[in-house]
Amino acid sequence: MESPPAAPDPFPVGTLVRHDQHGLGRVVARDRDLVTVQFGPDIRKISVNFPGMRVEPGADPEMARLKQALREVLHDFGWLDGEAELGRRWQGGTLVMKPGKDGAVKEVPIDVFFRKLIGVRDKLRVLEQKLNAHPVLSGEDKLELQGYVTRCYGSLTTFNVLFADKPSWFVGQSGE
């Protein structure tokens, strides 16, 4: 006797959801009965069975799957680093910025800071590709501008400690 087909996942990665307490968010990861949802700067792990969370009306789970497929293709061509993971010891941590003079302490969840850092790297990669493919710039100009991009990577090597895996690290001139 055949078992019935599995029901489609109501919360695939990319789906917009509405939470009773946290408002509108987007599913950024899925692990068995838990979804990781980004609500603005906050990230929460929530049970898929939680009654106070539902797919946002008008949200299209099929579109979410298409966007995830696009992310994977962009990763395959080196435009996005979907493999970059925050190191285990930093997960759940907080970046604390204390002013040297008067002012309030600023705290940022490390995973939020990490995602922004990955965003900067992704934009640098796109800039690098556009520079190299630019139809008007001379080879000398491309080389000069590429040097600035490489030095930007070098300036970001301080943050390599946050990455789970060395292949995702920022690399400057000395690491080429």
Image (cartoon, rainbow, N blue to C red):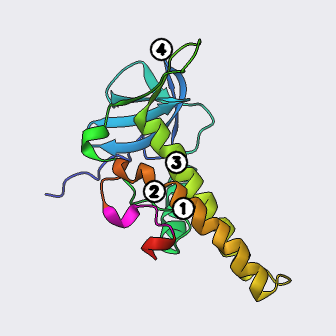
Which class describes the residues within 10 Å of circle 1: few (<14), some (14-19), or many (20+)?
many
Q: Amino acid at mark 1?
A: Tyr
What residue lies at 56% left-to-right and 51% top-to-bottom?
A: 119
Q: Residue 153's mark?
A: 1
Residue 11 in the image: above or below residue 74: above
**Horizontal and vertical percent position of residue 141:** 78, 80
Measure how far apart labels 2 and 4 are at the Cα level: 38 Å
Q: Which residue is mark 2?
A: 157
What residue lies at 31% left-to-right and 37% top-to-bottom?
A: 91
Q: Amino acid at mark 4?
A: Gln
**Horizontal and vertical percent position of residue 153:** 54, 61
Closest to the observer, 81 or 65: 81
Numbered disc 4: secondary structure: loop
Measure how far apart labels 2 and 3 are at the Cα level: 11 Å
**On-image quarter of the N terminus:** bottom left
Q: Which residue is mark 4?
A: 21
Magenta residues span 166-172
- Residue 36 shows up from this direction: yes
User: N-terminal of the two: label 1 or label 4?
Assistant: 4
Measure how far apart labels 2 and 1 are at the Cα level: 7 Å
Numbered disc 3: secondary structure: helix
Q: Which residue is mark 3?
A: 117
The answer to whether mark 2 and mark 1 are in CB contact below 8 A is yes
User: N-terminal of the two: label 2 or label 4?
Assistant: 4
* Mark in front: 2 vs 4: 2
